[in-house]
Amino acid sequence: MIREKGDRRLWHRLEGYSFHERPLSRSLIDRLHEETGHSLDVCYTLVEEYRRFMYLIGSTGETLSPSPIVDVVWRLHISDECAYFEDFCPRVIGRTIHHVPSDVPIDEDPAYERTLDYYAQEFGRAQVQYWPDPDVGAVTMSTALMWIVGVAAFALAVIFGSFLFAAFGAFVISGSLFLKWKFSSLPLENLNPES
């Protein structure tokens, strides 16, 4: 489903902006690849998520907060001051957007909640591996419940000698492992490009 953008002109300017050509001193994608160790495909996706975040800031005019991995892309872009402050912000966004580092965890940050709300309105539900769910407690509880159900199904399989319970238990536990793998598919350990 293609969503209609609230500010189509801004979105067209952002779509037309290349993050791997001049006026950047070096390709943002190449720098992100070197700094984080992500594959080039993941780096392209991260830059697209950054493009969407900049659209949200530019179209709402509100203070919004990026996800930790999108923040890495933003900091790398800002580090090329000429490209960011003299070209990207005035020509594409129409105003300068300053990066204000935040020590507030995403689960306590109302700006991050607003970002996810606006993201859902403009682009649909955000992908969890790029935009973590701020309700980490609920995710942990869901994982624990899936394991409890899976183990209980195996116990019932032993008690009743039922292949059906064993299959259900295997399905639930493998589903839990798959989701853990899927949602942790980015190596987020190296989030500080200055180090």
Image: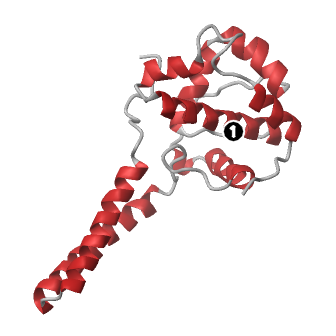
Q: Residues within 10 Å of mark 1 (few under 14, many from 20)?
A: some
- Percent x, y of residue 37: 40, 25
Tell whether 153 sits left or right of 103.
left
Q: Which corner quadrant of the image does residue 121 belong to? A: bottom right
Disc 1: which residue: 52
Q: Residue at x 37, y 60 (%)?
A: 140
- Numbered-mark total: 1
- Percent x, y of residue 10: 84, 34
- Percent x, y of residue 100: 64, 28
Q: Using the image, determine if residue 115 lies above or below residue 195.
A: below
Tell whether 29 sits left or right of 168.
right
Answer whether residue 123 is visible to the viewer in this image.
yes
Q: Residue at x 57, y 27 (%)?
A: 73
- Viewer-proximal residue among 140 and 1: 1
- Viewer-proximal residue among 194 and 183: 183
Answer whether residue 152 is visible to the viewer in this image.
no
Q: Residue at x 59, y 15 (%)?
A: 27
- Secondary structure category for the residue under label 1: helix
Quadrant into which the N terminus falls = bottom right
- Viewer-proximal residue among 94 and 165: 165
Kind of residue at disc 1 = Arg
- Percent x, y of residue 79: 60, 14
Q: Using the image, determine if residue 175 lies above or below residue 88.
A: below
Quadrant into which the C terminus falls = top left
The colouring scheme, among rainbow, by chain, secondary structure or one colour, is secondary structure
Q: Using the image, determine if residue 42 lies above or below residue 94.
A: below
